Amino acid sequence: MRTQYYFRRSAAGLCAWNVHRLIEISRGFARERVPLSAIREIDEPHWGHERSEQLTCREIAEHTRLILDCDLAYPVILSREGRVMDGMHRILKALLEGLEEIETVRFARDPEPDYVGVGPDDLPYPDDVPIPE
């Protein structure tokens, strides 16, 4: 699985969480089904929000490929406030398939970010990171 980050703006600057670490931390969390209608990001700008330019058609095609290839067996990871920290491609696949809800895990307290004030282009992206078991 390619290295991915979840981004959130804060008063301290752009915060970034390594998604592999979020998966590992949340592995034992109880799963719950959440209505897709409760996922706010479906109706908000999402990809490219940490950049100033809009997504290209090629980038949209890549996201489409990821949506079609993703596995709904893995739960979406939500922050304490219910924001999507990992799993937007799975949410969109569920939406396209006409599902009404999706399996999630949720942090009771969000972990500290891995990086603060570091832009997406300056983060490490090692190749071929194994998926945590």
Image (tube, rainbow, N blue to C red):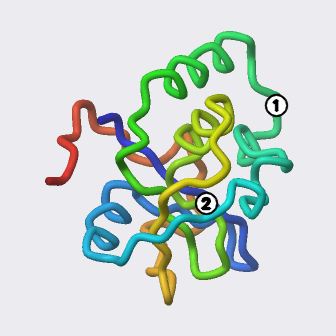
Residue projecting furthest to the left: 133
Q: Secondary structure at mark 1?
A: loop
Q: Can you say whether 15 is above or below 87 in the image?
A: below
Q: Nearer the viewer, residue 32 or 88?
A: 32
Q: Is residue 12 left or right of residue 44?
A: left
Identify residue for label 1: 53
Give the x, y percent position of residue 85. Answer: 55, 61
Total labels: the figure holds 2
Q: Position of residue 106 (x, y in %)?
A: 49, 75
Element type at mark 2: strand
Answer with left or right where residue 60 lies relative to residue 18: right
Measuring from the top left, give residue 32's x and y in whole percent: 48, 71
Give the residue drawn at x 49%, y 88%: 108
- Give the residue at mark 2: 84
- Point out the image quarter for the N terminus: top left
Q: CA distance from mark 1 to mark 2?
A: 22 Å
Specify whether 90 is left or right of 128.
Answer: right
**Residue flagged by tag 2: what amino acid is it?**
Val
